[in-house]
Structures are given as C-alpha cells and as structure tokens.
C-alpha cells in the first residue's frame, strides 16, 4: 500500500512483517524511532515478538546472538557510538554465523560528539564479517530489510542494513508498504542451520586453535563469495514478487557512454543523480554507479559497470580513513587492478551532517580533481587553526577553537 | 515544477509535524512529497526548521531547502534573524503567524520587493487557542498556506489532519485550519482590491 510515511516508521513496518521473534535494542539517535515503533507494535500485540529493553548496545547484540543461536529470528538497530560499543559482539555474531539483521542508521563517530549523518560507523565494521547493504531511498531501506532476513537465513550470516541517519530515517516520503501475505510468500519460516536445543546439545563458539582457525576463516570468506550470488538472486526474486528494483549489488545510472562515472553509497545518490542530469543537459557525458552491496564487495559487478569509463572515476565517500583516504576508493582500485586504470579521485563529502548539495556537486564534477578532495572544505578556518597551532604549544582543543573562530559557542542547532 | 517550503519555529511548536502534514496533504493529491526536519538535537524553545518539497515527479535530492518558494514562520519572535528569509525568491510566498500586520511587524520595507499579496500574517496561534484550546499553530498555518499558495487544497490539508490526529484534537485542528483559510483568503482579496484601486 502506498503511504506518505517517515523512513524509520516504514522500516519498522517492514521489519514487523518479517515476523522477528526477538527484538532487542538500546535507544540511540537517529535509530530510536525504528525500535520505538516496533516496541509499540509489540505492546499493542500487533506484533508477536519478544521485545527486550537492554542496558547497552553490547547487551543488545549479545541478546540477539543468544536468541539467534536458540533458533529465533532476531533483529536489532543501532548507530554511531552504539555500534562501536557492541563491536566485539558484532564480530562474534559473524564468527558464529548467526543470521541476525541489524539496521544501522548511519551517524558520525565522536569525538567531537556529532549526532548527524555520515558513514563512519558502518565503515568501522566493514571487516567484521557482516553483509552491508546501503539504502538509497526509504523505499529501498524498507525493501532491503525484507531481503536481508532472507539472505541472512539462507547463508547463515548476519546482515547490516545501512540507511542514512536523519536524511532517510527522519524524512517523510512516499513508500509502498507490502502486505503481510506478500512478505510471508517471499520470506519463508526461519530454518536455522545450527540451533541450541536441549534435546540435541551442541557447543557453539568454542575455542579453535591454529590447527583450524584459518580454515574457519576461509569458510567465512567462501560464504561471502556465495553471498554475491544470493544477493543478486534475492533482488531478482524481489523484483518478480514486488514489482520494483531494490537491493542487488550495484546500480548504474546513465553509465553507457559516460566519460566520468561518480561512485557513491546511500541517499547521496539521489542528489548526485540530480546533479548528473543537470550536467548531462549541459553536454557532459557523466553517469553514476550506486553501490548497494558494500560487503561483500562486488568487485566483478563494479568492474563490469566501470568498463566503459575512459577518463575518470570520482568516488564520493561519507567517511574518511585518516592517514589513508577513501575507504570505498581502495576497494574500487582493487576491483580495477590489472586494467588500464582511468584517473580515480576520492571526494570526502557530507561528514557529520554537512549538506551535500547539487550546486557543490556540479561545481566539483566540472573541475579538475586532486586525488583527494574535501567537498566544501572551509580552508580559511583550517588554515587559521593551523596558524594557531604553530604560534603556541598550548593552542588548546581544535574543535572548540574552530567553533570560537566561527563565532558560536555551541554547535549550531538546525 | 518542484515547490519547496521552509518552516521556521521553535522546538515544541510542531514544526516537524506541520511539514509532515503538508507532505501528507500533497500525497493525497497524488503528488510526490518529502518532509524532513533540520536534523538537530531537539530542544524546547530553540529555533528549529523543517522542510517540505512537493513535485509531480519522484524527489531524489536529500539536501536541505536553501531556495524556498515559500516560508512559513510559526514564531514571529524569530523575525529579527536575518537568515530567516535567506533564499526566498522575488516570486516567493511567506506566511507569518501573528495577529499583527506586516507594518506592525516592521516588515513593510522587506515586503516591497515581493508580490504584496503573497506575503501575509495570520493569527494562527490565536485561532488554535480558540478552536484547539492549545497555542499550536501548525494546522492553522497550513489552512492559511492553502489559501495563500494553492499548492495544496484545504480539503487535502483537512484530510491529512484527520489522518494524523483523532477526536477533539483532530476537530480543533481542522476548525483552526478552516478559520485560517478563510482569514487568508479574505486578506488576499482585500490586498488584490487595494492593488486594483491603485492601478
């Protein structure tokens, strides 16, 4: 059913239709609306699930692990510091091969504290062994959750559905909410590959030494390779069942004759497509490659989609690897290794909620680019702080110095 | 054509709800709409913004509205902020929640460059107090906005209110929206007559 609905609410409705048996969560902005809505559904008995309020994110993931190991379909959601706080359990969930689905409402990581959107949180866990799917729109966010449970359970691996905090979670947009029968037909009952059952006792997660640890990890690598096919097939079946394109590995837009291809993840793709339409109208041959599946990294699909680019690839990233540069760019370079590589540049954009605008994108994409650019960087502000640091040993905390320079004593609200 | 609206108010006045109601009203007219808040830590009384885009095509962008076609000012104590009017084009609309007129609000000078019948004040808080018994101006402003811009119809606004609220809250908000619609419609007609008389 078509509805005008807030992103968080739409995701909560989709998760509910997936019939999770255990939901555990600890509130953290900007994820809170999702679990709030789910808890209300459980309370009103619209959703037959166990809802556990836990004391921390570490407990949230630990409960999800326990529930999943006992054979329950388990769901949780988090963001930012919450994801970091549960990190040890995040790796365990993957190592144990438990098909937990988790929403990450992407948000920056402190310090300095920042509640706004970027991808630093999910990127920090990119090697934890979870699948990572990034939503471009609210419609895709809700669709990805339905696909996530199916992919997770088919492979027995956990799946992270990443949606941009505030930009998607708090935006009211049009979304098509599938009905219960449609989801039931698409998502079969959970049949665990391994289960803690008193009738047939087994150990899960016991110690493995040097004699077999490499093999265990190899199997995880192999499962990730299989995941590429499963994700692709699931998106195709989803299209057949629900009549729309959602999920999958990558999504090209106007790439066929493109001399520049912009690569990005998440909701910024919409704004980029608007910019690309504007540049196309002005005669520029430019296209976009959206990466929906970031883990496993779909190297072959990326290579195929970028096969036509003769001039340059611009990777727009909402996270930064300090001391290295672009996180997604590194994977793109690896995917293109051995080929006559076009010029690849990284653009760090939208950190900590900085708006990524069509105007800035159009200017950026028409310019010659350095290997690494920060979009809309206030260089004056940076230079003045560098000067202060040169002038005095005890120059004080940079974030506070910069805010004072801007004439504000606390972070601007709104 | 895309129509973009920016709401200015203070935390607790229902600024986000108002933008969502407008999106919901547009959705009822089979249009695409996107409403979102200004992404801040929400605090009672702090200046907040929300945004709404309405279009005939799917809306892909997720950037804030910087060049609004219309401004809805829920709290007139924000009018001294210079950035409040930022990006409003000369063909733009503005609706201010106030019982005072533009002259009393000190806005005559500002209004000079615009279409005069597109900038209006409506006593939305007073209307809300009368009909809803609470000074929450959102629904009334949307009623007035419908009369000012015709971007959505009053019926769609009323339907959106009916979906969002129940019982006396729904009735009070609907009554406030109707009253504000009538007020703005009459004000506009008066302004048009005045302009014709001067012509």
Image (spheres, grey):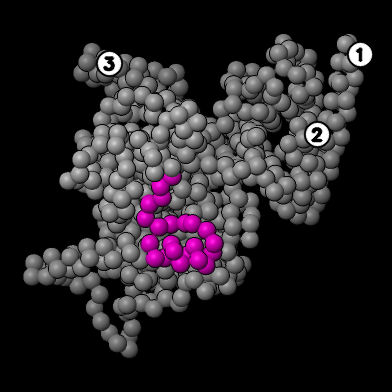
* x and y percentages locating residue A181 in the rendered image: 58, 73
Name the residue carrying label 2: B147
Name the residue carrying label 1: B197
* x and y percentages locating residue A240 in the rendered image: 50, 66
* Residue B15 image-quadrant placement: top right
Q: Residue at x 78, y 30 (%)?
A: B148
Mark toward the start of the polypeptide (2 vs 1): 2
Q: Which residues are magenta?
A: A232-253
Contact between marks 2 and 1 (CB within 8 A): the answer is no
Foreground: disc 2 or disc 1: 1
Q: Is residue B10 visible?
A: no
A288 above or below A11? above
Disc 3 element: helix
Q: Residue at x 59, y 57 (%)?
A: A176
Name the residue carrying label 3: A388
Image quadrant for the N terminus of chain A? bottom right
* Residue B173 image-quadrant placement: top right
Looking at the image, which is closer to me, A46 or B132? A46
B44 above or below A388? below
Q: Chain of mark 1?
A: B
In the image, residue A243 lies in the stretch drawn in magenta: yes
Q: Residue at x 43, y 57 (%)?
A: A247
The dot on residue B174 is: none
A224 above or below A396? below
Residues flagged by tags 3 and 1 on a common chain: no
A162 left or right of A18 in image = left
Q: Is residue A280 visible?
A: yes
* Residue A100 image-quadrant placement: bottom left
Disc 1 element: helix
Looking at the image, which is closer to me, A174 or A393? A174
* x and y percentages locating residue B21 in the rendered image: 69, 44
């Amino acid at each position: 059913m078509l509805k005008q609905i807030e992103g968080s609410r739409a995701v909560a409705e989709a998760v509910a239709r997936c019939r999770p048996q255990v939901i555990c969560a600890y509130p953290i902005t900007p994820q809170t609306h999702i679990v709030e809505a789910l808890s209300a559904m459980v309370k009103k008995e619209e959703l037959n699930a166990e809802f556990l309020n836990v004391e921390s994110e570490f407990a949230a993931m630990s409960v999800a692990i326990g529930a999943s190991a006992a054979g329950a379909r388990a769901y949780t959601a988090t963001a930012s510091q919450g994801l970091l706080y549960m990190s040890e359990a995040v790796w365990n969930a993957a190592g144990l091969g438990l098909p937990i689905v988790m929403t990450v409402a992407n948000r920056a990581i402190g310090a300095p504290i920042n509640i706004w959107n970027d991808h630093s949180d999910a990127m920090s866990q990119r090697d934890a062994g979870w699948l990572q799917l990034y939503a471009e729109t609210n419609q895709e966010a809700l669709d990805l959750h339905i696909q996530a449970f199916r992919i997770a359970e088919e492979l027995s691996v956990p799946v992270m559905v990443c949606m941009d905090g505030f930009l998607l979670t708090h935006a009211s947009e049009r979304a098509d909410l599938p009905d219960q029968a449609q989801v039931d037909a698409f998502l079969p009952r959970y049949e665990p590959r391994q289960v803690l059952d008193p009738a047939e006792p087994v150990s899960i997660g016991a110690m493995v030494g040097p004699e077999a640890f490499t093999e265990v990890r190899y199997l995880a690598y192999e499962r990730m390779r299989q995941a590429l096919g499963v994700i692709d097939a699931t998106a195709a079946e989803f299209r057949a069942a629900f009549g729309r394109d959602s999920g999958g590995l990558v999504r090209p837009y106007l790439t066929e004759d493109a001399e520049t291809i912009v690569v990005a993840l998440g909701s910024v793709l919409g704004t980029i497509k608007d910019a690309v339409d504007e540049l196309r109208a002005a005669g520029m041959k430019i296209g976009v490659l959206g990466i929906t599946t970031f883990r496993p990294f779909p190297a072959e699909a990326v290579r195929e989609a970028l096969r036509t680019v003769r001039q340059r690839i611009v990777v727009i990233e909402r996270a930064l690897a300090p001391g290295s540069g672009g996180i997604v760019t590194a994977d793109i370079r690896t995917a293109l290794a051995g080929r006559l590589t076009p010029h690849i540049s990284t653009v760090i954009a939208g950190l900590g909620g900085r708006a990524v605008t069509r105007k800035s994108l159009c200017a950026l994409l028409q310019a010659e680019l350095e290997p690494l650019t920060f979009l809309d960087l206030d260089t004056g502000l940076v230079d003045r702080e560098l000067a202060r640091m040169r002038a005095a040993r005890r120059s004080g905390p940079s974030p506070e110095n910069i805010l004072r320079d801007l004439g504000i004593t606390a972070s601007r609200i709104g | 054509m895309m129509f973009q609206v920016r709401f200015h108010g203070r935390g607790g006045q229902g600024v986000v709800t108002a933008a969502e109601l407008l999106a919901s009203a547009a959705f009822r007219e089979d249009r695409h709409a996107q409403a979102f808040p200004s992404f801040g830590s929400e605090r009672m009384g702090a200046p907040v913004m929300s945004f709404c885009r309405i279009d005939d095509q799917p809306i892909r962008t997720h950037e804030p509205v910087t060049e609004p076609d219309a401004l809805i000012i829920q709290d007139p104590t924000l009018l001294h902020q210079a950035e409040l009017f930022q990006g409003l084009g000369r063909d733009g609309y503005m609706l201010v929640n106030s019982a005072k007129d533009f002259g009393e609000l000190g806005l005559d000078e500002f209004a000079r460059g615009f279409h005069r019948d597109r900038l209006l004040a409506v006593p939305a808080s007073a209307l809300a107090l009368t009909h809803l018994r609470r000074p929450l101006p959102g629904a009334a402003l949307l009623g007035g906005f419908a009369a000012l811009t015709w971007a959505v119809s009053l019926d769609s606004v009323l339907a959106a209110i009916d979906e969002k609220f129940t019982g006396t809250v729904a009735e009070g908000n609907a009554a406030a929206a109707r009253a504000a619609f009538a007020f703005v419609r009459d004000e506009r007609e008066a302004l048009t007559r005045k302009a014709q008389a001067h012509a």
